[in-house]
Every structure is written in C-alpha cells, then in structure tokens.
Amino acid sequence: MFIPGASNSARHVDATFAVILAIEVFLLFAVTAAMIFFVIRYRKKKNPRSENIEGGMLLEIAWTAIPTVLVLIMFYIGLKSFILIRKVPEGAMPVQVTARQWSWQFTYANGKQSRTLTVPLGKPVRLVLRSQDVLHCLYIPAFRIKEDCVPGMETYLWFTAKEKGSYDIFCTEYCGLGHSDMLSKVVVMPEKEFDAWYAGEGEKGGLGLTVLESRGCLGCHSMDGSKKIGPTFKGLYGSQVTVLTNGKERTVTSDEEYLRRSILEPGADIVKGYQNIMPALPVTKEELDAIIQYLKTLK
Ligand code: CUA
C-alpha cells in the first residue's frame, strides 16, 4: 500500500526509490529481450557448429560504461537524500525516545512525557533514540524515516512534518513476544496548538496514568478489556482472579494488597493463562498509591 509522504524527506526518498525502480525495470526488460533474441537467433537447428568469436571492443566498452553510469546515478541521488536525512538542522526540537519491551516513551525538553509523539507542523524535530533492553527500530512510514534503537548506544533521526494529521509509528525489529504491540502515533499539529499542548498538564488520569504510561505498562496491559501480553486493567479492581502461587492454583480477590504485590513482585502470583515475564519496575510509594487509585477507576 502506498502511504502519502508527510515529511520534508519523503519526496527525496520516494524520488530515489522511483529512479532505482525505473532502472531495474529497464534492465529487466533489456536482459529478457536480449535473452529471447539470442535463443531464437542462435538456436541449434540453424547453427549446428559453434563459432569462436574473438572479442568486440565496442561491445566491451558499452557494457562497462553503461552500467557504470547507471550505478553512479543511483549512488548520486542515494547519497543526496542520505545526507538530507542524516544532517540535522540547527535548532531542531529535541525529543528523547526510550524503547523498551514493549512500548515507546517520548520525553520532551520540559520533562513532559507521552506515549504518542506530538510535534509541531513545519518545525524540525530531532529524536534521540535509546533502548532499555534489546534492539528495537523506530519506523514512521509516512515520514520515510527509520532508525534502530540499540542498547548502550544513542542513535538519532530528524524530520520536519509537512502535513497535519496522525501517522503510525512501528517497531520494525523483532523484539520478543510483544513486538507487534509496539505501535504508536505521531500527531502533527499547528504550532499554536502544539505550544498549548506542550505547556499543558500531562495526559488526563493524573500521576497514576502517567506512571503506567511512562513505565510502559500499557504496552502489555490494555485499559479497554482486550487481552494483550498481560491481563487487562479494565474491571481488574475488585474482581476474582485465578492465579498460580508457587505453582499452586488459587482464586484471590483483586484488592489493594493483591495489586500492590503484583506490581512489586510480579512473579509472586501469576494470573492463569499468562506467562511470568513482567519485570519488577522500581516505583516510589507515592507512585504505587497513585497507580492503585487509578486502577480503581477503571471499572
Ligand atoms: Cu520493539 Cu519490536
């Protein structure tokens, strides 16, 4: 499916792709035509005895020069768009990107954090990419940009969004069970709207939701009742949960104590039907209380 370009580099990347594709299609037809011609022209019936042909200077020059020129054309336009993609303009707005199993976290210069990437229209943005665990890869098809997030290393990307709207963000490096859940959006809004968003409060839901989002909890736990890598948060509080405790099955009521234990010691009670893969993330007492207060509201 063709996705219309929505960034400054999209035009150049598409042009590079089109030129290379055109050369390839031309070569495919040229080689196929020559092959068919030779098969017919030099078939055994008409040429029972093969002849020894002693070189041909003109031919040799042609089949050296033409491919060389074609390859240099591809190199030139490829290099030009590569430089454009790698050279970040001065004053680009920095956004820190943290990739982890299995979510994206975007942190802005003023400390604001979000699970979706919100950017102003027509302004260059520089993404600084880091990974907390394994290889991930940030890909924004509509912007025609893509870069790996490598543990222990900092990589970057930049773009200027050219169209208002919301575009997909994918992880394109297989990173484990929840790889396909590493979906997010980049939201492009006019500068004024962006400034208001940037200066405004964190997303609604207060500290509890902010912690759930920023720690990546929502990559594995849904809030709408759907089953992901982990159980949904919707209606969790107060419900009856069948868990395995030290391999023994039992049913518990999901109260404050249960939620607290499940966050601090994820391996203590494993909800039946799920795997023991949740990491114990450090949270302060205040954050823990806020999470539980928030979970209570998800009826
Ligand atoms: Cu992260 Cu795939």
Image: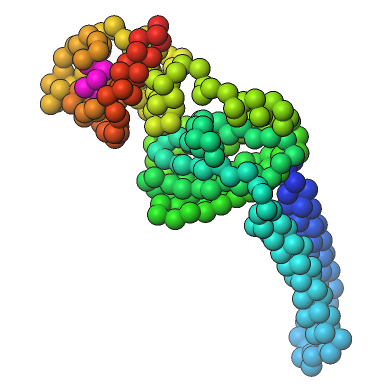
Residue at the spot 84% in from the left edge and 73% down from the top edge: 41
Residue at the spot 41% in from the left edge and 52% down from the top edge: 151
Relative to 197, 244 lies left or right: left
Which quarter of the rendered picture does the C terminus lie within? top left
Relative to 276, 54 lies left or right: right
Residue at the spot 41% in from the left edge and 10% down from the top edge: 298
Q: Position of residue 14 (x, y in %)?
A: 76, 49
Badge count? 0
**Is the residue 239 above or below the residue 77 in the image?**
above
Type of secondary structure dominating the magenta stretch:
helix
Relative to 235, 68 lies left or right: right
**Is the residue 14 above or below the residue 180 in the image?**
below
**Location of residue 78 (image quadrant):** bottom right
Residue at the spot 68% in from the left edge and 35% down from the top edge: 120
Q: Position of residue 11 (x, y in %)?
A: 78, 48
**Location of residue 143 (image quadrant):** top right
Q: Position of residue 127 (x, y in %)?
A: 57, 46
Range shown magenta: 258-262
Quick one: which residue is furthest to the right in this view?
A: 58
Relative to 188, 180 lies left or right: left
Nearer to us in this view, 177 or 48:
177
Q: Position of residue 188 (x, y in %)?
A: 68, 32
Quick one: which residue is furthest to the bottom in this view?
A: 54
**Is the residue 281 above or below the residue 259 in the image?**
below
Residue 71 part of the magenta segment: no
